């Protein structure tokens, strides 16, 4: 826990020195650092021919992260502070939430129907392109270039 605290402190200090918003750091640097170990594990599982396990891990990890990763800090804050955890609503966070909900809806519709419960190379490239598009939309919203 102390290593994670130090990492977050360094990330926050770097963002302050470089004038980078904490939302941008969280949606990029922190998210990438958190996801890379999962990515390597899922690549190993997929290379071993366990496609179902790799896909299940892709969905199971974020579900755990969203529910427990959000629920635990809020519960700790409520116990320690006697209040809710403050959260700054911004256009960038709104875009990030909309992207997450939209992506879940699309994946639930596309994988079973369009992809016939399979993931092809074309689907993989479409997912990577979608991630790039989402990152661009998040950056546009975070910098307030359009919103």
Image (tube, rainbow, N blue to C red):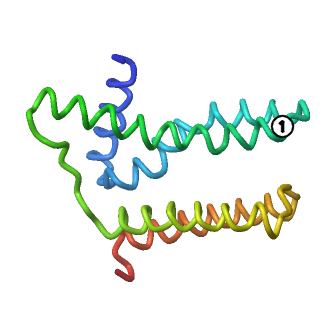
Estimate the x, y position of residue 82 in percent, counting from the top left.
8, 34
Question: Can you tell which quarter of the image residue 39 is in?
Answer: top right
Which residue is located at x 36 percent, y 70 percent?
143
- Residue topped by disc 1: 46
Q: Which of 133 and 50 lies nearest the eye of the viewer?
A: 50
- Is 120 on the left or on the right of 131, as rendered? right
Estimate the x, y position of residue 87 in percent, counting from the top left.
23, 52
Which residue extends farthest top?
A: 2
Estimate the x, y position of residue 90 in percent, counting from the top left.
28, 65
Which residue extends farthest right?
A: 49
Badge 1 crowding class, 10 Å Cα cut-off, few under 14, some 14 to 19, many 20 or more, is some
Which residue extends farthest bottom?
A: 146
Quarter of the image with the C terminus is bottom left
Which residue is located at x 33 percent, y 31 percent?
72
- Is 133 on the left or on the right of 66, as rendered? right
* Above or below, 85 relative to 127: above
Question: Can you tell which quarter of the image residue 69 is in?
Answer: top left
Q: Which of 140 and 49 lies nearest the eye of the viewer?
A: 49
* Above or below, 109 relative to 45: below
Q: Circle 1 sits in a helix, a strand or a loop, which is it?
A: helix
Quarter of the image with the N terminus is top left
* Above or below, 19 relative to 12: below
Total marks placed: 1
Which residue is located at x 40 percent, y 47 percent?
26
Q: Which of 116 and 28 lies nearest the eye of the viewer?
A: 116
* Above or below, 140 relative to 125: below
Which residue is located at x 58 percent, y 60 percent?
104
- Is 57 on the left or on the right of 121, as rendered? left
């Amino acid at each position: 826990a102390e290593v994670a605290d130090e990492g977050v402190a360094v990330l926050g200090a770097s963002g302050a020195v470089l004038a980078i918003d904490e939302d941008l750091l969280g949606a990029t640097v922190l998210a990438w650092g958190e996801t890379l170990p999962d990515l390597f594990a899922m690549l190993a599982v997929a290379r071993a021919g366990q496609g179902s396990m790799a896909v299940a891990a892709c969905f199971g990890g974020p579900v755990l992260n969203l529910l427990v990763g959000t629920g635990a800090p809020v519960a700790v804050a409520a116990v320690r502070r006697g209040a809710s955890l403050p959260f700054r609503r911004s256009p960038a966070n709104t875009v990030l939430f909309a992207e997450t909900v939209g992506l879940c809806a699309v994946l639930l519709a596309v994988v079973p129907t369009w992809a016939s419960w399979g993931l092809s190379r074309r689907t993989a490239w479409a997912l990577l392109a979608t991630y790039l598009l989402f990152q661009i939309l998040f950056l546009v919203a975070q910098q307030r270039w359009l919103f």
